Amino acid sequence: ALGVSLKRMRLAAFAIRDRRHSQLDPRERQRTLRALTSAISDLAREHGLIAMVGAVDDFTIGVLAALPRSSSEIEEAGRLASQLREGGMPVLIASTGSHRGIAPARDALLEAIEIVSTAAGIAVGTDVVTSRDLGLRGLVYMLRDDPRVATFAQRTVGALISYDAAHNTNLVALLRHF
């Protein structure tokens, strides 16, 4: 519509969360989200990155950035995470690679939002995460609300939960360590 061709640009999709988001009350979370959005926009501008930055929900900031030829999306995400951490904003950034065209970039942004949500839920220790970093634990976390998974878990772990309740033991907690 604006006459800007995105087919030749390498677009990177990032989803970013403040690591402290679960510890904040809703008002503080909104202030933090606005400050983080502003800081990301400022950093992108300082580095000459063409980017769209905005909150996508109450916890997550989405970024679509045109990557320079000389850098990768992981390098850009790592640099951004490092600079935000130095500025007192510890973040978790999900990256889904680089894409050409707006439709693949949109899909990548949706995937990055899912990845950052999962990574925050399973407490990933690195600043930059991709789908490969989530592993089986991340897959199970993503599917936790699926009724088939709930049925499977009840069928396989239900007896252990009942045993813990009846005998005042904590075997389920022990199982989590495996």
Image: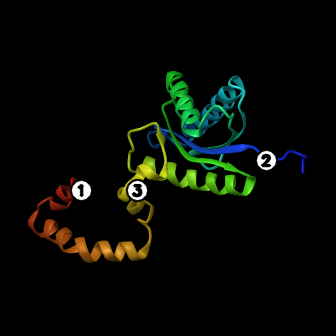
Q: Quadrant of residue 70?
A: top right
**Residue type, label 3:** Gly
N-term mark: 3 or 2: 2
Element assignment for label 1: helix
N-term mark: 1 or 2: 2
Residue at which label 1 appears? 176
At horizontal 29% and vertical 74% (from top left) the residue drawn is: 154
Up the image or down, 16 lies above or below 139; here it is: above
Element assignment for label 2: loop
Q: Which mark is residue 83?
A: none
Q: Residues within 10 Å of mark 2 (few under 14, many from 20)?
A: some
Circle 1/circle 3 CB separation < 8 Å: no
At horizontal 50% and vertical 22% (from top left) the residue drawn is: 86
Q: Nearer the viewer, residue 142 or 51?
A: 51
Q: Nearer the viewer, residue 77 or 23?
A: 77
Residue at which label 2 appears? 6
Up the image or down, 78 lies above or below 139; here it is: above
Circle 1/circle 2 CB separation < 8 Å: no
Measured in 3D between alpha carbons, the distance from the residue under mark 3 to the one under mark 2, in whole angstroms, is 32 Å
**Residue type, label 1:** Arg
Up the image or down, 66 lies above or below 133; here it is: above
Q: Nearer the viewer, residue 148 or 20?
A: 148
Q: Which mark is residue 138?
A: 3
Of discs 1 and 3, which sits in the foreground?
Answer: 3
Q: Residues within 10 Å of mark 3 (few under 14, many from 20)?
A: many
Q: Which x, y percent locates residue 24?
A: 48, 39
Element assignment for label 3: helix
Q: Residues within 10 Å of mark 1 (few under 14, many from 20)?
A: few
Q: Tell whether 41 sits left or right of 115.
A: right
At horizontal 44% and vertical 48% (from top left) the residue drawn is: 119
